């Protein structure tokens, strides 16, 4: 018996030694993906000369759109937008301003529905220097017409920000925030937007102060993503709001972890909704499927500005592509399912800066990336499958 116990003890020691001296098992890091980025040229629209400043890009139904402005030598702006059937050859759209501020609008956000563009623009003005916000819609002849609005619709004493615009089967949704909490502006056709704020679930309440960062059309209606700053505590929690009509909303706060989190961008990828944002000291995804949400994979790392700003999120036919603040080798990330993310090498770094704007859109196997560094704007397109290289 003593001999058996001794042999058994020796085996245990040997097995432990094997485990302790061998390398720890780990999943190898995915190889970087290297799209074939090609620069594209946007023609200067007819009118006074100037440099292009770009703010957003979108795509739907086989048409791509970029929006921004033309800035002359004195710093004056005029609205500008372009369309393309293939993301390579671009044509300026003709803006039709209806107000004195519209003549000088900088178009900051773009949405697409049924192959037509809608945009949000603004110009600082008035006695108090407040932003004067307008919406714009593409009409049948291809021109982009300003839709004037009363100042209080987008501005007024409760104004905080007017953010991104999304199109869908039910019309249009603009996400933003007011002094009362999160807000939305909805329209069935882009001709008239109704402000929705101070209503249950999106308004600040005993649970905390909401912040809406982005929105997207989903089969059941609309979805907003953002965060809630919990009452009496530091840190924020990621939150999503769902609505069938854009007027009545239901809030869901997602698990954040000890260091807090937020959601900054959201897209639909096939039957799944993918949202990305800050998670603790890094970045991560959350996945919406079957009426519920669950955490997806983390991404970011070396070369990424942390805790992390998400510049943009695009849906390809094979997955989601995120662009975050960082260097060229650390700011692009791709995932087929929102779980495991692979780095994507960008044509240029996109570090966080006050004068920088970055946007991305995708369809099929194509992605368009625009980067405006404050004095120079550039656009690239990557088409076809992405392979490690």
Image (spheres, grey):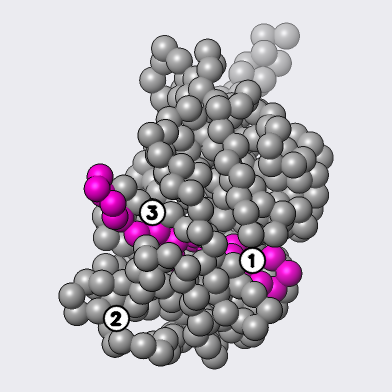
Residue density around tag 2, few if under 14, some if 14–19, many if 20 or more, within 10 Å: some
Answer yes or no: is residue 182 visible. Answer: yes
- Residue 39 or residue 221, whichever sits in front: 221
Q: Residue furthest left?
A: 74
Crowd class of label 1 (few under 14; some 14 to 19; many from 20; radius 10 Å): many
Residue 51: which numbered mark, if any? 2
Q: Is residue 145 left or right of residue 128?
A: right
Q: CA distance from mark 2 to mark 3?
A: 23 Å
Tell me if 128 is positioned left or right of 98 in this view: left
- Element assignment for label 1: strand
Magenta range is 105-129
Q: Is residue 122 magenta?
A: yes
Magenta stretch: helix, strand or loop mostly: strand
> Reading the chain from its start, which is encountered first: label 1 or label 2?
2
> Which quadrant would residue 295 be assigned to in this image?
top right
- What's the residue at 25%, 79% (across, down)? 72
- In the picture as drawn, the residue positioned furthest to the top comes out as 1
Q: Which mark's residue is nearer the viewer, 2 or 3?
A: 3
Instruction: Name which residue lies at 69% across and 29% down.
Output: 250
Give the Cα separation between the discs numbered 1 and 2. Answer: 25 Å
Q: Which residue is mark 1?
A: 112
Give the Cα distance between marks 3 and 1: 22 Å
| Picture layout, residue 312 above or below residue 143 | above
- Provide the residue designation for mark 3: 132
Where's residue 373, x and y in %?
A: 29, 68
Q: Is residue 335 above or below residue 294?
A: below
């Amino acid at each position: 018996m003593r001999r058996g116990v001794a042999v058994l003890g020796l085996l245990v020691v040997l097995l432990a030694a094997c485990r302790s001296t061998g390398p720890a098992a780990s999943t190898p890091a995915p190889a970087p993906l290297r799209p074939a980025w090609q620069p594209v040229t946007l023609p200067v629209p007819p009118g006074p000369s100037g440099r292009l400043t770009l703010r957003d890009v979108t795509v739907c139904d086989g048409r791509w759109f970029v929006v921004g402005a033309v800035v002359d030598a004195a710093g004056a702006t005029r609205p500008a937008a372009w369309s393309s059937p293939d993301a390579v050859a671009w044509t300026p759209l003709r803006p039709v301003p209806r107000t004195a501020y519209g003549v000088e609008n900088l178009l900051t956000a773009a949405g697409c529905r049924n192959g037509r563009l809608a945009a949000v623009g603004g110009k600082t003005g008035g006695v108090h220097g407040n932003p004067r916000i307008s919406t714009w819609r593409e009409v049948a002849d291809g021109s982009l017409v300003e839709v004037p609005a009363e100042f209080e619709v987008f501005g007024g004493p409760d104004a905080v920000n007017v953010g991104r615009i999304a199109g869908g089967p039910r019309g249009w949704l603009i996400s933003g925030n007011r002094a009362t909490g999160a807000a939305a502006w909805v329209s069935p056709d882009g001709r008239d937007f109704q402000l929705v704020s101070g209503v249950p679930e999106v308004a600040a309440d005993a649970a905390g102060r909401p912040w809406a960062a982005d929105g997207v059309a989903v089969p059941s209606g609309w979805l907003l993503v953002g965060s809630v700053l919990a009452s009496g505590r530091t840190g924020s929690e990621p939150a999503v709001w769902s609505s069938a009509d854009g007027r009545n909303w239901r809030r869901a706060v997602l698990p954040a972890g000890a260091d807090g989190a937020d959601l900054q961008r959201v897209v639909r990828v096939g039957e799944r909704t993918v949202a990305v944002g800050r998670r603790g000291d890094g970045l991560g995804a959350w996945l919406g499927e079957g009426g519920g949400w669950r955490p997806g994979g983390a991404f970011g790392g070396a070369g990424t500005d942390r805790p992390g700003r998400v510049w943009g999120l695009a849906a390809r036919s094979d997955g989601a592509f995120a662009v975050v603040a960082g260097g060229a080798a650390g700011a692009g990330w791709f995932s087929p399912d929102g779980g495991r993310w692979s780095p994507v090498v960008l044509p240029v770094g996109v570090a966080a800066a006050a004068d920088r704007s970055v946007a991305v859109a995708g369809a099929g196997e194509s992605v368009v990336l625009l980067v405006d560094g404050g004095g120079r704007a550039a656009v690239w397109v990557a088409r076809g499958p992405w392979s490690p290289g």
